[in-house]
Amino acid sequence: MKMLFSNPDTREIFSISDFSSYKQLMFDTGLGREKVSKDQANKKLRDIMYSVLGVDDKCSRKELRKAIRKHKIDVYEIIEETVENLLNCGWGENPFFNECVEYRSMNSGDTNEFYVPDDMILTVSEMSGGHHNLIRQRISGGQTFSVKTSWLGCKIYTEFELFMAGRIDWAEFIQKIYQAFDNKINSMVYKSFVEAGNKVLPSSQFCKTIDFSAPTAREEIITLVEDVQTANGVEAVIIGTKTALSKLSGLGDINWISDSAKEERHTLGRVRLFEGIRVIEIPQVFNINTTERAIDDTKLFVMPQVDNKFIKVYDEGESQIREISDGTTNADMTVEYEYQQKIGVATVINRKFGTITID
């Protein structure tokens, strides 16, 4: 693969094989795969970056800043691809995403169109740019939906300067961007899901507040699961945060369960099955720039296992770097850049499902 840099001098730095191996080195180092030592990897990455910037490792901080400004497009094209690949890789390893999220990307040739069979029990929640509605069109046998998208971003200038100065390594630099962006998208996904749960039709049959200390708690949960399964004709799963799911382990006597299930409870803080019902963990996230939990630890959801994944994520094309300061706005004269991707998230549920509020 050859990167089409806008600067012809930079294009000359990379041959086809050179850029492919360099890109792989960035990706492996960002993931912590040490095919070579960390020091060797970072030296190679910095050497190439210095070549792109047209300076060497003896340059002053002022010279480095000028070089970054001059070659910002070339440098951040490289960063864009690395972080985007890491995000897709990370989502693929998340059980909740695998079970519940349908991801589409313009880069993969996907269109912003999601189909939902025409079972007219529909709950919609969207987290994107302040909008909470979908563009939808009825077709024979079902409906199609388009998810609104908006730009998400995080500032990255200072961290890149520290990497070039040898103060942090590439993995740490990329992980800072990846973790901030991944946390934001996960927060959007989980909040969209929880908001959809809040919009389910009020019904004593499917929306329950259960006192987990009551002797009837176990039976109430099983009854709700059975109702969801009966309404949809498929098996159901219980979804919640680790804290919420851990409360299931305290219901009833566990002395009879298998040793493997006891070990699961010991190592995971919960079991993978509750009375034969599979449980799926929603990873907890904090609200941005706080340590406040974003997902309610007192909520459990009973969802039917259907082929149609109910959370829709659409990635509208390639990521980009946007300059957000002219170098005179900030007191320290720095120029800031923001890594951005345009993404929309929506929850579309066309089946009956259950909610449990833990009392």
Image: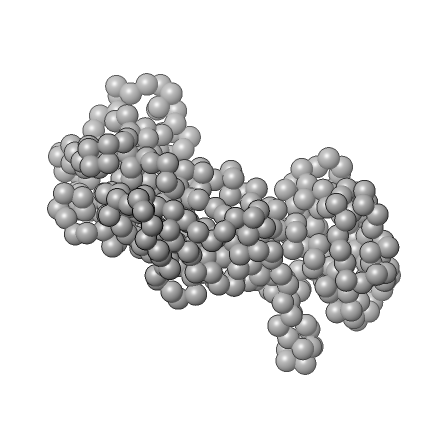
Q: Residue at x 19, y 39 (%)?
A: 212
Question: In this rendering, does residue 353 appear at all?
Answer: yes
Nearer-the-camera pick, 146 or 95:
146
Q: Position of residue 40 (x, y in %)?
A: 79, 42
Q: Residue at x 65, y 70 (%)?
A: 323
Residue 345 position (above or below residue 334): above
Q: Position of residue 295 (x, y in %)?
A: 36, 52
Would you identify the image quadrant in which residue 241 lies?
Answer: top left
On the rendered image, what quadrant is the N terminus found in?
Answer: top right
Q: Position of residue 142 (x, y in %)?
A: 32, 46
35 to the left or right of 288 = right
Question: In this rendering, does residue 182 appear at all?
Answer: no
Q: Residue at x 39, y 24 (%)?
A: 263
Q: Position of residue 80 (x, y in %)?
A: 65, 55
Residue 200 position (above or below residue 67): above
79 to the left or right of 94 = right
Would you identify the image quadrant in which residue 340 lies?
Answer: bottom right
Nearer-the-camera pick, 325 or 125:
125
